[in-house]
Image: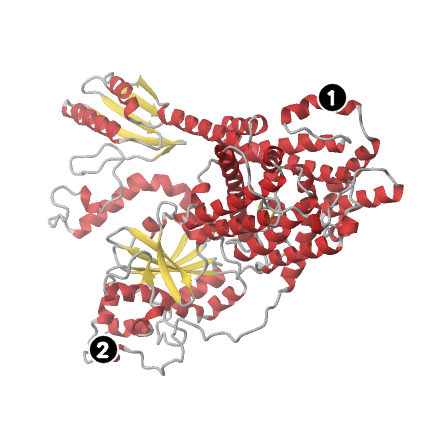
Amino acid sequence: MSACAPPRTQQPHPPHSPPPAPHRRFRVAGADLSASVAVFLIALPLSLGIALATGAPLQAGLVAAAVGGLVAGRLGGCPLQVSGPAAGLTVVTADLIHRYGWQATCGITVLAGLAQLGLGCLRVARGALAVSPAVVHGMLAGIGLTIAVAQLHIVLGGSPDSSVLANLLALPAQLADLHPGAVSMSALTLTLLLAWPRIPGRTGRLLRRVPAALVAVAGATATAALTGLALPRADLPSWSSHALAGLPEGPVLGVAAAVLTTTLVCSVQSLLGAVAVDKLLAVRSGPQAHVGRSGLDRELLGQGAANIVSGALGGLPVAGVAVRSSANVNSGAVSRNSTMLHGVFVVIAALLMVPLLEQIPLASLAALVMAVGIQMVSLNHIRTVTRHREVLVYAATTLGVVFLGVLEGVALGVAVAVALALRRLTRTRITHEAKEGVHHVHVRGQLTFLAVPRLSRALHLVPQGAHAVVELDGSFMDHAAYESLQDWQSAHTARGGSAELTGRRSGVRTGDPAPSATCGCRPWTPWRNHQACIAGAPSAPTVPAAHELARGVSSFQRNTAPLVRAELARLAREGQRPSQLFLTCADSRLVTSMITSSGPGDLFVVRNVGNLVPPPGEEHGDDSVAAAIEYAVEVLGVRSITVCGHSGCGAMQALLTADPTGPVTPLKRWLRHGLPSLALMAGERRARPRLAGRGPADAVEQLCLTNVVQQLEHLRAHDAVGRALAAGALELHGMYFHVGEAQVYLLGGTENRHVFEDVGVDGGAAWEERSPV
């Protein structure tokens, strides 16, 4: 191996690892400090208002806000998500307090936190996102309506009941017995809350830096104090008498259901919030290079730890909060320090600002929480579920949460969603029509075994010897339907007829005409080597290569070109705008469009022997890769670069078996750029990349993995890449494709511990969890 080492002075550190940074004291970025202040100013009134809405001690809201900021902010997997008492938990917590009392509710919060820790250890966080969005939006809407109806009584000067139905029935009497002071302070709060973000001009832009929630509550508090109105105000008991968690008493099944409900709502809201924060970061302009994508399992662990601490200290349940998280991102936060600092500010306020907080009118807090509840019924969500024909699921979940409870409403929504999906799966329309001597059999919907009898009846209406066109307008066909259709087609063509099978979706043809005698493929045949279409053995050595190429071109012109012509015409007019540079090997088995499911204009692809990136200054006359990198980054403005290696790479095999005494060939001159990968593999064992779940099969696979990591280091050395990385406009990713397993692995891990993790059917989600390499 020594003969293959690069002819350079040995570095004091491995070539893939930068020298360790000197120890520095803890520092807070200015963006994090300003963002934490903005979040704190929003969190303070909302925490008190949510505690009021649940019927818990007002201090419990401050405890939850502080713990959410410090514990979930430090341990969670979404650095910029702000956790604390959430409006989505108000109904659940209020019901628990009504049934079990406050201290028992704290104990249930601790148990829910333990359940979240268990779910996080089982790595099931992604499973929570499998719940239909219509169910989630319906749950939030139902909770919002419940909150709004309950707080309306406080706004009018009364007190709410424990159920929505009772609050609705008592509303006429409450309207007849208004409290003018409470109504006026509530109206002032709502007016300021709605008008503050709409102040026009330059003055408005400056004033809007102060959160509307703080302005609304502070304005009502100051007005009440100046006018001397006699109103119920916030009452924060002494910390010396603060109640801590206790053991819940009651039927075991009831307590288990309470824990399950709290766990479900906390987890789903936090995970959806983490995904939303990732989306906000993706479109945010400004510094975001060091903000990694959310790790959902870690986020679940962080939320569980926060709920354990909050419940034990007598705080409300904790979850990720959309309003505060959005403010954190929009304020320019760059690390989890902003979230943690907001928790520190809440602690300071809880200890030093109690006399000031006790001047806040309860009607003002109630109006603030009522506005939040109304906002949870999102018109945008309603339009979305209407467009996807899931209004029934949304309505069932919303009404179930309002009149039955959160857990019951979610269960009802899931049941309706499953029933609707089964109905769509089994609802298939099959029609037969004869036009100008051609018999059309149109299948709309999913073609399963349940529809085979009707399909068979429609196909037998086609006379012998006639020309038939079978249009499949659906996205799924099971084996029974496939066999039935194939048998009919074989029998029909054997009797002198002709059959054309087409697939139509939104008017775009997706199927091929009926196969000829020389082709073994069918319209529903999955991708395979094109030689499967040649009669005889798969290798078909008697067919000249030029004829194979001509046949492929002819198939493209006949079948594929009509489908892509409009898109290619658009790309020809607008020019290419790829989002990624994909650098991979020239191996013929590596089909980039297949493994990335990409189309024209998506990827800027560079292929060479061994997917190598020559370091700057070592190209020696071959600047093709460097030119492609510079063009992609500076001209095309790609947002990510992926280096993709693969199993059984011939270039890596040649590196391992190279004879240093043989003649210098063009291949050897090119492969010298892979010598640093060879040196890295021969170096420190703990730094060698590995595959998730197993080690490399042999030295070739180890070198293939190591080469991906090394070429990423070479990429960083290029000036264009370095500038883009420093500006936060570019990400680097590593990928490994195992040809024999048809399995893609994505590079993750830490700076000195690289792990290629497999990607299953949830590939997009898996990619989102990986931080840029």
Instruction: Identify residue type, mark 1.
Output: Pro
Labels 2 and 1: the sequence-earlier one? 1
**Which of the pair 111/262 is nearer the observer?**
111
Residue 525 location in percent, x, y? 25, 38
Front tag of 2 and 1: 1
**Which of the pair 224/757 is nearer the observer?**
224
Most extreme residue toward the right, as rendered? Answer: 227
| Residue shown at 38% from the left, 75% from the top | 14
Q: Rounded to the nearest whole Å, what is the CA distance between mark 2 and mark 1?
A: 95 Å
Q: In the picture shown, does residue 111 fall above or below 382?
A: below
Q: Is residue 150 visible?
A: yes
> How many marks on residues?
2
Is the residue marked by circle 2 packed among few (<14), some (14-19), or many (20+) residues within 10 Å? Answer: few
Q: Which residue is mark 2?
A: 664
Q: Quadrant of residue 612?
A: bottom left
- Quadrant location of the C terminus? bottom left
Q: Quadrant of residue 704?
A: bottom left
Relative to residue 699, is residue 44 drawn left or right? right
Q: Which residue is mark 1?
A: 172
Instruction: Identify residue type, mark 2.
Output: Val
Residue 209 location in percent, x, y? 72, 52
Q: How is the image coloured?
A: secondary structure
Q: In the picture shown, does residue 552 fall above or below 682?
A: above
Q: In the picture shown, does residue 382 fall above or below 648?
A: above
Q: Quadrant of residue 434?
A: top left
Q: Are marks 2 and 1 in contact (CB under 8 Å)?
A: no
Q: Which mark is residue 398?
A: none
Q: Is residue 609 visible?
A: no
